[in-house]
Amino acid sequence: MPLKTLHVYCRVVDNFGDAGVCWRLARQLAREHALDVTLWIDRPAVLARLVPDLTLNAAPGGALVVRPWPEAEPDDAWPDVAVCAFGCDPPAWLRTRLAGGPVRPLWINLEYLSAEHWVDGCHGLASIKSADGAREHFYFPGFRATTGGLAGERGLLAARDAFRAGGAAAAWWQAHDLPDPPGRRVSIFCYPDAPLVPLLRAMAEGGEPTLALVAGGAGGDALSQWLNGLDKPTQEHRLPRWQAGKLTLVRLPMLPIDDYDRLLWSCEVNFVRGEDSWVRGLWAGRPMVWQPYRQTDQAHRIKLDAFLDWQAPALAGLDPAARTAVSDLSHAWSDGTDPGPAWIRLTRALPSLSVAFDALSRETALQDGLAERQGRADDVAAAD
């Protein structure tokens, strides 16, 4: 069954991550797979902050159209595939069509990303709704070849390597008024419950200068109070910055989605969260610390351990101290305990960890990605 048109339906629940994942997938399917793609989103303003040049109801340079969530049935031709992201319910009029009629699109439930092994067995399964016979397919992104793959554009790692090797990285850094002190660069994008201030204190007291680029909104009142006690440079800068011992801290504004990639490419260590930045941190090929959304039943710990288990073979040849530093820092960061001691141990192993995470990104990129697998009817409809 050759695919021609595909619609993605997105209801924004988890801040910007849902919108980012859906945008990247829709854009890649349009650009690289010759599909006519419509992204229907209930909060276009959220996506517009990630894609500043976004234009609704227009196709910017390709066959991708972004439109507000369709409460009423549109007049357009029906898609071959309807992708309902993250378990969102399709509009009522679409739900009726999915149950039968002259045009019955393939219905895909694009689930959240996980490294847990149960995902492999559930990917591709179908559920027939007893009320009307509609057939829903469960599509699970994942890190192994037996899942639905990861979002990643063709040539992404080549673009990353060229950015680092040429003058583009320095030019981008300067254009964003970012300081360039000696030492390491660290990007931090985290949930409010992350133990951010203890981490920053450890950086300030460390042996090597560290530039921490902290996303706006991170840290909450605790960070604000800590920053109030620090010195701010007298020179005016576009972005606010502070100095504490060996630490230079910069608060970042919301970056366009492609500039966030460049930020990750420019840093030696990346703290990421959720889903979209999690995958982009992997593609950056640098040591990363992932923070899952904390849950009261400790399900986040299970998800974190599954991811650490997946990446463990890539670190197997390293010194045990390097391996445990990654695990200990990840757990402290996720559980809200003091990450300082594990951070210090991780910095001592950065050279070997950098090589290992670069190799991990390249090995993972050899697998077919999320868009490649969704762009093939034989994979999408494997359960039929």
Image (spheres, rainbow, N blue to C red):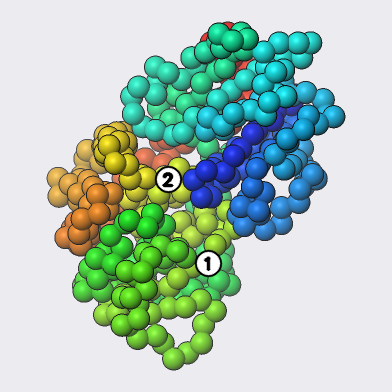
Residue matched to label 2: 274
Q: Quadrant of the N terminus?
A: top right
Q: Is disc 2 placed on a helix, strand or loop?
A: loop
Q: Amino acid at mark 1?
A: Pro
Which disc number belongs to residue 213? none
- Residue 48 at what x, y percent from top left? 66, 54
Crowdedness near tag 2: few (<14), some (14–19) or many (≥20) residues, C-alpha within 10 Å: many
At x 15%, y 50%, the residue is: 321
- Residue 300 at what x, y percent from top left? 31, 40
Residue matched to label 1: 253
In the rendered image, the vertical position of residue 337 relative to residue 205, given as above or below = above
In the rendered image, the vertical position of residue 271 relative to residue 210, given as above or below = above
In the rendered image, the vertical position of residue 222 relative to residue 362, given as above or below = below
Query: In the picture provided, is 46 more to the left or to the right than 31?
Result: left
Q: Quadrant of residue 320?
A: top left
Visible residue check, residue 151? yes
- Residue 241 at what x, y percent from top left? 43, 78
In the rendered image, the vertical position of residue 312 relative to residue 216, given as above or below = above
- Residue 347 at what x, y percent from top left? 24, 60
Query: In the picture provided, is 207 more to the left or to the right than 170?
Result: left
Between the C-alphas of marks 1 and 2, the distance is 19 Å
Q: Amino acid at mark 2?
A: Gly
At x 59%, y 39%, the residue is: 11
At x 76%, y 51%, the residue is: 55
Q: Is disc 1 placed on a helix, strand or loop?
A: loop
